[in-house]
Image (tube, coloured by chain):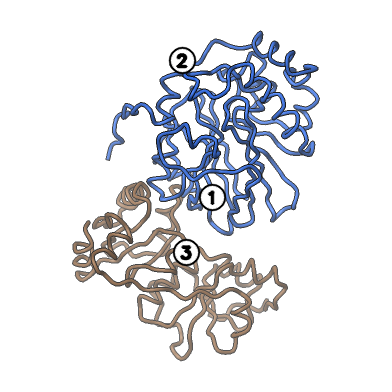
Amino acid sequence: MIFKQIRHEPLAQASYVLGCARAREGVVVDPIEDLGVDFYVLEAADLGLDIVAVLETHVHADFVSCARELAETTGAPHRLHEAARGLVRYDLVPLADGESIRVGQVEIRVIHTPGHTPEHCAFLVTDHARADEPWCVLTGDSLFVGDVGRPDLLVGDQALDVMDEGERAARQFASIRDRLFTLPDHVEVFPNHYGGSTCGGVNMSGKPASTIGFERRFNLALRQPDAEAFARFVRETAKPFPDDYRRIKSINLGLTARQKATEATR
Amino acid sequence: MTPDEVAAAVAGGAVVLDLRAPRPFAREHLPGAVTMQFNRADLADRAELVLPRDVPLVIHAEPEPIARVAAELLAGAGFRVAGRLDGGLAAWKAAGRPTVELPLLDVDALRARLDALEVLDVREPFEFRHGHIPGARLLPSGDAWSRLEEVPVDRAIAVVCGDQTRSAAVASMLQRAGRDVRLVMGGMVDWLERGYPVEREPARV
């Protein structure tokens, strides 16, 4: 398996390129516009991978995505959980809970983990060249290292938000407890954010990876006895809101045209 | 470059350098194209190893950012880059231009047909000595461009390396020279994994 975590330090954001060395095919997960389409195309090429799918864990609110543009450039499908279909204003190939995406020996299983957003998914990765048990999980903005994704990044339009803050907190608690913490201890956790990111709370670690076993024992938010205590804890330990998150979310939903950054020099 | 401009350059002696992965290349490529693996770290080094510097190159890579960067890297390394194919294979075919296929073999098919094929191993001599397919002929990839005529003409050729990186390059050169050639996917890694026989005698060059 080829696996690369790409860390964009200014936003403490992590995107991923992973795939099968033998099949020479791979996927990109949660690409960020600040790095841009060319960056991912060349990164994948350097790793010897043709991009066959562009996946997003959810519609982001704290950074502008380049998933649509990357899908267009590579001809690969842009994939988000099917719950995003009524929300976004562009075409996508929906993901379903339990679905497996296969690239050579690598299997990526979709785990629907609503909470941070209604369409949020985690991606469970198994490298069948090594073992038939999962090796790592890309947790997006559900489970972070030492923290969890915040449930309060609402745009203020019920049709787009779908769930209010209270429901999101309850769903986040259940998604992590029942769907992620039921994975084997050895499964590595690779989140969408780390350290200083404002998508989580003050307990978010600067370390960009962990394991299910470690987080099950030591993640303070998930040590709370019930969903209500979890919601209270998350609110009390939240950071300030991310800059401009309503506008960013609106761009990523396809409601607002993105201001084209300086056109790449040719 | 438009497909017409590429065709004119090729008619004038340019070589199309196809930087896509071996499978898409094998499925369909421009007639006469030579292929190589793209990688920003070592594209120029690989090119220096296997390609002559005096031949103008037309870059075919997809998607477009790879073609642009490859052209810069090769020009920077002193190669003559005539241009790059705009719009890739789709544009070429839309212009009504022909494509060709490079037949592939896996190691099982290679083993089954070993008697009928000339096995050409394009790894380095030290790798060849360590273990090669019985009866294989050694022609290191860096020597291939200038020594193609040494490869016997009486049988179809199966080109092998460790996987299919160097073998794809040499297979494309042989096909360009009009030879009946097969690219072995998976190479010696797959051959050894299957436990197929190997020879360890000194190289027959």
Q: Is residue A53 above or below residue B107?
A: above
Q: Which of B201 and B179 is in front in this view?
A: B179
* A182 versus B159 height, above or below: above
Q: Distance between the residues labelled 1 and 2?
A: 32 Å
Residue B51: x percent and y percent? 37, 64
The residue to which callout 1 is attached is: A26
- Residue A204 in the image: state x and y as whole percent: 65, 19
In this picture, residue A264 sits left or right of residue B108: left
Give the colour chain B carries in the figure: brown
Q: Residues within 10 Å of mark 2 (few under 14, many from 20)?
A: few
Q: Which amino acid does label 1 sit on?
A: Gly
Mark 3 and mark 2 in contact (Cβ < 8 Å)?
A: no
- Disc nearest the viewer among 1 and 3: 1
* Distance between mark 1 and mark 3 Cα atoms: 15 Å
Q: In this view, does A266 lie above or below A9?
A: below
Q: Which of marks 1 and 2 is in front?
A: 2
Q: What residue type is labelled 2?
A: Asp
Residue A27: x and y in percent read 53, 46
**Residue drawn at (40%, 27%), measured in percent from left and top?**
A251
| Earlier sequence position, callout 1 versus callout 2 | 1
| Residue pictured at 58% horizontal, 22% vertical | A163
Between A212 and A174, the residue placed more toward the observer is A174
The part of the image, by quadrant, that contains residue A138 is top right
Q: Name the residue under label 2.
A: A243
- Chain letter for the residue marked with disc 3 in the picture: B
Element under label 2? loop
